[in-house]
Amino acid sequence: MTNNKLKIKANNLNVYYGEKQALFNVNLDIHSKEVTALIGPSGCGKSTFIRCINRMNDVIDICKIEGSIKIDGNEIIDKDVDVVSLREKVGMVFQKPNPFPKSIYDNISYGPSIHGLAEKKVDMDIIVENSLKKAALWNEVKDRLHEAGTGLSGGQQQRLCIARAISVNPEVILMDEPCSALDPIATAKIEELIDELKKSYTIVIVTHSMSQAVRVSQRTGFFHLGKIIEVDTTEKIFKNPGNKMTQDYITGRFG
Amino acid sequence: MSDITHIVKSYEEELQNLNDNLIKMGSLVEAQLSDSMEAIIKVDKEAADKIISNDAKVNELRATIEEQIVTVLVKRAPMAIDLRLTISTLKISSDLERIGDLAKSVAKKIKPLPHDLPAELISSLRRLGDLVQRQLKNVLDAYLNKSKDSAIKIWKTDEKVDDLTHAAMNEVADFLGQDKKNLDLATHLLFVTKNIERAGDHITNIAESLFYLIEGEHIEGARPKGKDFDPS
């Protein structure tokens, strides 16, 4: 089941790293409270694309972005956009879990405190607890909130990073291969979490696992050489794709 | 279908093996059906025995194909065309196995028959049998050539199979009406006719699976329906 409410709309997006063009006229609609999976061979531009959604590419000096990305109709590819508040709205989880070298509690409270979301300690306690609960980590860490986040297992660290992303009440969560460093059990926990999170958040996930894309997403976009080749419901893409290149890629026939 | 092969060669080989076994099974079932038709027309009891014992080979191939499919599913998690191929092959092999069973069932009915059957019964049975054999041959060819148009044509022709079944059954009913002593023979022949018609239904299923394999969609509309048997 997919819904039709648009959350993010990319229009004629072109991205350059110096001389090299990484994205070519990408048009892509991301629907609200749904999981959109982006697939494609390494270097096809899928990570570049999601990094545009929270302007992560701004930190790369030679990166130049043209075109438009609108979230709820508001342009975000604009110099005047406040990227700090954008990133409050658009959280991100990376391939390798990257907790801060701080306590579990401080990992979660960092975002809300810089965004001024909690005035009192008790408010912060609630945010920390709720974020950890939403990330399905609370029961495992509630008795050791002041131990180092880096002391958790890989899967727990990734859920901590998801809790950290959730703590500032984002609307969109970007995930760049969030399970590629995790074992099957930790992966299953993240996938279960994604199922749960999509009720409240719009999720865009980059994955190299075709079966993961099928399991977690409602829509899938296939990128190749910086272009979006096909976007459709995940069911259509994996049962009967409309484009031969998509089919060759997902069936392991890519030359 | 894709003109590019899989990066993993053993995957390609597994799908090729599956395909080869399905074709082998198809030829075997085709032979079983045509042998059973010839045997009933000639009332050849020796041929009937051979058909009955050959059915084990069909079942064996079906078991092999099923095992191969389970392996492909667990090893490769096939997607798109590969997924449709795997699922369709499973369904087609199941329909072929049922056609094999029906051929065997026809052969079993030969044993209690007298040595000569009335000519009019033979000719209506032969017409039906010929059509169903042609349908089976065509659907196997269509599978080999991955022909969507042939699949549709075969699917539509099932209506004719139903009509010929209807005619053959009425013929048997007339024969029974002539003399109540014909009851035993007539009952056997009714079963034989119904079995051939059912084989036709399985061929229609195969055409449907083939269409899904090629198009990724189901043939639209309900299955064509011929006249029902009406003994009045």
Image (cartoon, coloured by chain):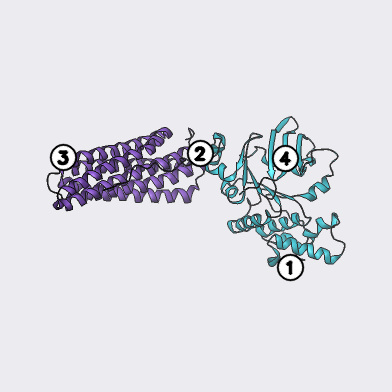
Chain colours: A cyan, B purple
Numbered mark located on residue A144 in the image: 1
Residue where numbered disc 4 is placed? A9
Q: Do pointers 2 and 4 mark residues of a single chain?
A: no
B116 displayed left or right of B133 = left
Residue at image location 20% in from the left, 38% down from the top? B123
Q: Do pointers 2 and 1 mark residues of a single chain?
A: no
- The chain letter under disc 4 is A
- The chain letter under disc 1 is A
Residue where numbered disc 3 is placed? B119
Quarter of the image holding residue B139? top left
Residue B112 visible somewhere in the drawing: no
* Position in image of residue B187 (x %, y %): 21, 52
Dot in front, 4 or 3: 3
Q: Earlier in the sequence, mark 3 or mark 2?
A: 2
Residue A113 visible somewhere in the drawing: yes
Numbered mark located on residue B7 in the image: 2
Dot in front, 2 or 4: 4
Number of residues whose C-alpha sits closer than 10 Å to that of mark 1, classed few (under 14), some (14–19) or many (20 or more):
few
B133 displayed left or right of B42 = right
